[in-house]
Image: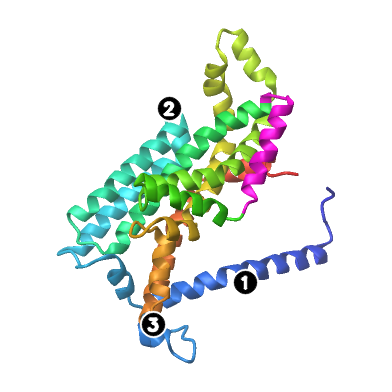
């Protein structure tokens, strides 16, 4: 593709992209402002951009009671998660594979989150947050594990059966959501798994698995067969070559696919609303505040929306390097 060198054309392109970016960010910016307003300010007829901010909405959303020393508790939690973020950003500098560093960071972070209710009185919204982490993490682990094996097998197998499997998987992915939800609702009712994390994970994996298989297969197609063949000549079997040679090369593609799976599982509303009665995730919890008739709910809904968006922003920020590298290596081309 020829590079555009006309500065006037570039100026027009950059102006359009800047306006589009501002248009995309404006709703989240306004929601953030609403989350720091009082209900009276948020329901003002004239939109207020200059006001005295308050954190009461976040306090009411997350805490039943403020700790005796809130500053100390906040600083300790910020220090812990800040340190974990720094470790994750510098994962490649450790003498072990980056994947193990990321897993250790996630495990420690989740353990800290589970310990917070032992010394802080939290609201129900915190339980929704933990439910979201469990369901999303479980979906990613199962979906990526199956997707890597299936994608690798379909990338290396050139028979007719592989084509049929891919077409069938694509057909299932194109089905409307209700065609999945109602059978799984029936299954959950009769198996005793209704309103559990396991049922949500199983259903989300079933819905998103064709996408992960197709995406990971496209990554494996870009890796020459000679690489694992060389490892097998040196004495490694196919599984060892896959784990020790292919997976490190595939890591940006795995991270990219995992991030897309995360977004699909994290933001699902209809499936969670039907398959759970109390173990909601954040997307359903937000509707609890947004649908209230109390004018004060608008500020709580804004605080809930911002709280739900922040973890995604942090995760994308940490893995942005692998995401860009994975997308530019041909995983989404065509």
Q: Gap in Å between the C-alphas at discs 1 and 2?
A: 42 Å
Relative side of 126 to 257, left or right: left
Q: Residue at x 54, y 72 (%)?
A: 27
Please name the residue that numbered disc 2 is placed on.
96
Res. 170 image quadrant: top right
Crowding at mark 1 (Cα within 10 Å: few <14, some 14-19, many 20+): few
User: Residue 306 appears at what percent x and percent y?
Assistant: 43, 66
User: Residue 321 appears at what percent x and percent y?
Assistant: 56, 44
Q: Secondary structure at mark 3?
A: loop
Q: Earlier in the sequence, mark 3 or mark 1?
A: 1
> Residue pushed farthest bottom?
45
Magenta stretch: dominant SS?
helix
User: Residue 220 appears at what percent x and percent y?
Assistant: 65, 30
Relative side of 52 to 116, left or right: right
Q: Secondary structure at mark 1?
A: helix
Nearer the observer, disc 3 or disc 1?
Answer: 3
Q: Secondary structure at mark 2?
A: loop
Crowding at mark 2 (Cα within 10 Å: few <14, some 14-19, many 20+): few
Nearer the observer, disc 1 or disc 2?
Answer: 1
Residue toward you, 329 or 169: 169
Tell me the magenta residue range.
Answer: 156-175
Crowding at mark 3 (Cα within 10 Å: few <14, some 14-19, many 20+): few
User: Residue 333 appears at what percent x and percent y?
Assistant: 72, 44
Q: Residue at x 22, y 67 (%)?
A: 64
Please name the residue that numbered disc 3 is placed on.
293
Q: Is residue 173 magenta?
A: yes
Cβ atoms under marks 1 and 2 closer than 8 Å:
no
Query: Relative to 61, does residue 174 appear above or below in the rendering?
Result: above
* Residue 23: numbered disc: 1
Res. 119 image quadrant: bottom left
Q: Earlier in the sequence, mark 3 or mark 2?
A: 2
């Amino acid at each position: 593709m020829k590079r555009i060198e006309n500065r006037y054309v570039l100026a027009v392109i950059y102006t359009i992209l800047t306006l589009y970016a501002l248009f995309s960010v404006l709703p989240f910016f306004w929601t953030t402002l609403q989350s720091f307003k009082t209900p009276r300010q948020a329901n003002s007829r004239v939109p207020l951009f200059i006001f005295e901010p308050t954190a009461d909405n976040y306090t009411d959303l997350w805490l039943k009671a403020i700790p005796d020393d809130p500053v100390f508790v906040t600083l300790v939690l910020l220090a812990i998660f800040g340190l974990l973020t720094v470790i994750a950003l510098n994962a490649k500098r450790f003498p072990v594979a980056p994947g193990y560093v990321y897993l250790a960071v996630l495990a420690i972070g989740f353990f800290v989150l589970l310990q917070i209710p032992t010394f802080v009185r939290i609201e129900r919204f915190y339980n929704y947050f933990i439910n979201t982490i469990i369901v999303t993490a479980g979906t990613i682990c199962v979906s990526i594990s199956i997707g890597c094996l299936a994608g690798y097998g379909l990338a290396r197998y050139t028979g007719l059966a592989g084509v049929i499997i891919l077409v069938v998987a694509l057909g299932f992915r194109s089905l409307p959501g209700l065609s999945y939800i109602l059978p799984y609702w029936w299954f959950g009712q009769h198996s005793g798994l209704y309103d559990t994390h396991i049922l949500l994970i199983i259903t989300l994996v079933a819905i998103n698995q064709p996408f992960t298989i197709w995406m990971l297969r496209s990554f494996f197609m870009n890796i020459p067969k000679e690489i694992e063949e060389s490892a097998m000549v040196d004495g490694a079997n196919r599984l060892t070559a896959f784990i020790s040679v292919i997976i490190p090369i595939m890591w940006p593609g795995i991270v990219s696919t995992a991030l897309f799976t995360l977004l699909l599982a994290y933001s699902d509303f209809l499936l969670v609303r039907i398959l759970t009665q109390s173990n909601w995730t954040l997307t359903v919890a937000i509707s609890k505040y947004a649908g209230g008739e109390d004018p004060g709910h608008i500020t709580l809904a804004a605080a809930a929306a911002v709280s739900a968006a922040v973890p995604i922003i942090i995760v994308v920020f940490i893995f942005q390097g692998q995401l860009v590298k994975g997308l530019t290596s041909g995983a989404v081309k065509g």
